[in-house]
Image: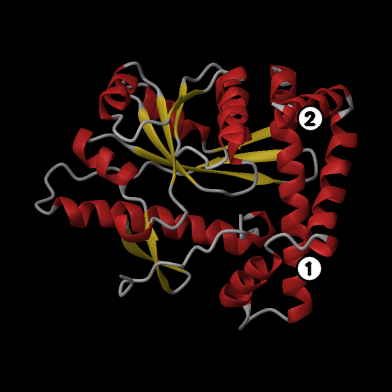
Amino acid sequence: MVQKLIYSFIAKLLQILPLSCGLFIGRRLGDLCYSILRIRRRVVLENLRFVFGAEKSKTHIRHIAKRTYQNFGMTLIEFIRFPVLQQDYVRQHIGFHGKEHLDSVLQANKGAIVITAHFNNWELMGAVHTLMKYKVIVFARELRNSVVNTLVIENRKKVGMEVITKKYAARDMIKALRYNYLLAFLIDQDARNHGIFVDFFGKSASTFRGAAAFAVKTNTPILPMFIVRESNMNHTIYIEPPLLPNPEAHDEQSEIFRLTQTATKLLEAYIRKYPDQYFWFHRRWKTQPNST
């Protein structure tokens, strides 16, 4: 209860402040977490060294790490400000690239599966689509901290997103596609022994198969989407051409692998271009094929 009251007070303050001031606070919060508190800094630096150690200097890697914390600080502020988001914000601060792919797929009135990742402000991308009158459902795992989990769900709902958190939600997802929803999945966290192994920066990474499996089962197009921070206040949402399941594929598991690997390689390309916008705080390669 106390935790929620503190959050509510801070949220109200940040929602009153101009966006530029809030984002400044977010960057300074990132500096604090990187330089003083050092929250998961070892993990971030280990991940960056693994991916870029052969091509970037130690100084450059530390700069990327610091910018990663600053970007996440701004992402947090933007998420807290969801209750005051309006369409004017979209017109002023959000650009689109490839929106024709989205509109073309939805013309069939059978919905689409969106695959994205913890890249820049992934939550803002969903909020922007709801503000533009697209119907969005997020398939999300429940967070360990019940208070934080409730606050995250509440903020998503305040901007019009719907949330599916149940472990077995196939009926809800099929119904959503029938009503032409965008069904969004995050595919870039370690799936432990429940995932499939795909190549991610040259190393096997256990990856959730649910999005691709559901696409194959329902013959639904997959739209890879990523949001890029172009400046402190401005973003561009990139919508890649749809990945289409092959209805004539004889091996369902191979088709699931193909789609998941293709989406993962797209993510890898965005990370290489914008390395400070990825969520390096997670031990992405923790589970390996020989893990027990």
Q: Residue at x 87, y 22 (%)?
A: 16
Q: In the visual, does 95 lie left or right of 161?
A: right
Q: Nearer the viewer, residue 129 or 166?
A: 166
**Quarter location, residue 167:** top left
Residue positioned most to the front: 1
To which residue does mark 1 refer?
Answer: 63
Local SS, label 2? helix
Tell me if residue 141 comes above or below residue 251 in the rendering.
above
Q: Quadrant of residue 195?
A: bottom left
Q: Residue 34 at what x, y percent from top left?
A: 79, 61
Q: Closer to the N terminus: mark 2 or mark 1? A: 2
Identify whether 9 is placed above or below 207: above
The residue that label 2 is drawn on is 6
What residue type is disc 2 on? Ile
- Residue 175, image quadrant: top left
Residue closer to the observer: 14 or 2: 2
Q: Position of residue 46 (x, y in %)?
A: 62, 73
Q: Residues within 10 Å of mark 1 (few under 14, many from 20)?
A: few
In the rendered image, the residue lying farthest to the bottom is 54
Report the side of 227 relative to 19 (left or right): left
Residue 76 x/y as whole percent: 72, 40
Instruction: Tell me what residue is drawn at x 51 percent, y 61 percent.
Output: 268
Question: Which quadrant is the C terminus positioned in?
Answer: bottom left
Say which of 212 and 145 sits in front. 145
Q: For the residues labelled 2 and 1, say whether their Cβ atoms are less than 8 Å apart.
A: no
Quadrant in which the N terminus appears: top right
- The residue furthest left is 250
Q: In front of the other: label 2 or label 1?
A: 2
Q: In the picture provided, is 166 more to the left or to the right than 284? A: left
Question: Is 109 on the left or on the right of 277, as rendered?
Answer: left
